[in-house]
Image (tube, rainbow, N blue to C red):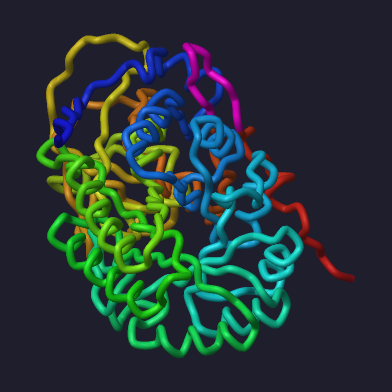
Amino acid sequence: MIAAAPEFSTHQTHFAGLAIAPLAEQFGTPLYLYDAELIRQRIADLTAFDVVRYAQKACSSLAILDRVRRAGAVVDAVSAGEIRRALAAGFTAHGETPGIVYTADIFDRESLDLVVEHAIHVNCGSPDMIDQLGDRRPGANVTLRINPGFGHGHSQKTNTGGEQSKHGIWHEQVDECLLRADRYGVTVTGIHMHIGSGTDLEHLSQVCQAMERTVATVGRTVTTISSGGGLPVPYKSDESFIDIEQYYRLWDDSRKRIEQQVGHSVRLEIEPGRYLVAESGALVAEVRAVKKMGTNRFFLLDAGFNDLARPAMYGSHHPIALCPRDGSETTRPDVDAIVGGPLCESGDIFTQAEGGFVCSRKLPLARVGDFLVLGNAGAYGFAMSSNYNSKTRAAEVLIEAGQAKLIRSRETFDDLIRGEQIPD
């Protein structure tokens, strides 16, 4: 069953049941808000899978990780810092289903040290990783992340398969990887395949076939297969969710054929990132200028691509809504507006298409002091934020059971220059 596409309103005064304007006054702007209940709902959507493994790169704040863990999901880490975050949020590396899996295309020295120290399961994205792990931890079990030779994504920059992608082990190198593993007594117990974000069911069937071919090569040691992530979420009213039931059926049918191949049960994992958190998050920013440039009208905010990089990086569309400063429901006339930020960059525009083409939106007429709400900003929002132009990063607030809980304080100038020195 496909969930109905959401209706994105251009006028919004509440978020997760709380009034937005008082939250902006209390915590300041730019401000990230998260709906805890929606994260739990998205995890529950995927309970048919044996394991829901959250790709924490989408949003790795400790409180979000904690709520994901409490909801029964485990976690994927792609760096030493993400390993440390997972441990700090209460995940453990132990158990039949590893609470933490390190997935990457390399080991930097710190990540290898942590993987060895905490006996963390590794999803190897390069053949060299097998040698490096085997030398330090002979006899380990590993997963191979396979690049099947094709990919898919909502943007070329999110396509993680095919010859142009750096990700994964090329599908023709599986035998070589098995030979490398044998040298160190390393056992390949899992196969992981992820071809990019925005996966559709046609491509998914090709991924399932590639998974079955790979397992046939590896053999009976395989006990886990991972469908990867990339589950899409709607960012526009004409977009819809993927059919989760059909998605699961395709993978479950593939899993059953694999179980016949290997002669034992096989665990089926899914690795969602943005599916769990994108809709839960919103970036609230204050309108600081409204101006005309020729025939164009600009709403300029106190948030920029240092706060939400996806539009500038990918040309991504985010729903945008006006929240009047007084919180009123009074309607205003719609106008064509370009929404931008404060940065000293022409690309600091939230309403643009891939390739940097500036677009306008039909939005209610904003005034200085009003707030704009950029929706579906929970995934790759704060996680990709930066201090460009010496901007401090936003505060984060979790809305849970009708309460607003500060989960990250706004950065200060002292935070910004910590670690810097002026030498004699």
| Quarter of the image with the C terminus in it | bottom right
Q: In this view, does 405 lie to the left or right of 231?
A: right
* Residue 178 percent across, percent down from the top left: 49, 84
Q: Is residue 277 left or right of residue 67?
A: left
Q: Which residue is drawn at 19% across and 25% down?
A: 9
Chief secondary structure of the magenta span?
A: strand
From what the image shows, is residue 267 above or below residue 220? above
Q: In this view, does 43 lie to the left or right of 422?
A: left
Q: Residue at x 17, y 18 (%)?
A: 332
Q: Which of 148 and 177 is in front in this view?
A: 177
Which residue of the protein is positioned furthest toward the front in this rendering? 263
Q: Which of 347 and 53 is in front in this view?
A: 53
Give the quarter of the image for residue 289.
top left
Q: Which of 366 and 128 is in front in this view?
A: 128
Q: Is residue 374 visible?
A: no
Q: Is residue 119 visible?
A: yes
* Residue 210 percent across, percent down from the top left: 26, 72
Q: Which residue is drawn at 39% across and 58% down?
A: 226
Q: Is residue 401 magenta?
A: yes
Q: Which span is picked out in magenta?
A: 397-407
From what the image shows, is residue 49 above or below residue 251? above
* Residue 240 percent across, percent down from the top left: 15, 40
Q: Residue at x 30, y 47 (%)?
A: 350
Give the quarter of the image for residue 224.
bottom left
* Residue 32 percent across, percent down from the top left: 47, 33
From what the image shows, is residue 225 above or below residue 367? below
Q: Is residue 101 magenta?
A: no
Which residue of the protein is positioned furthest toward the right in this rendering? 424
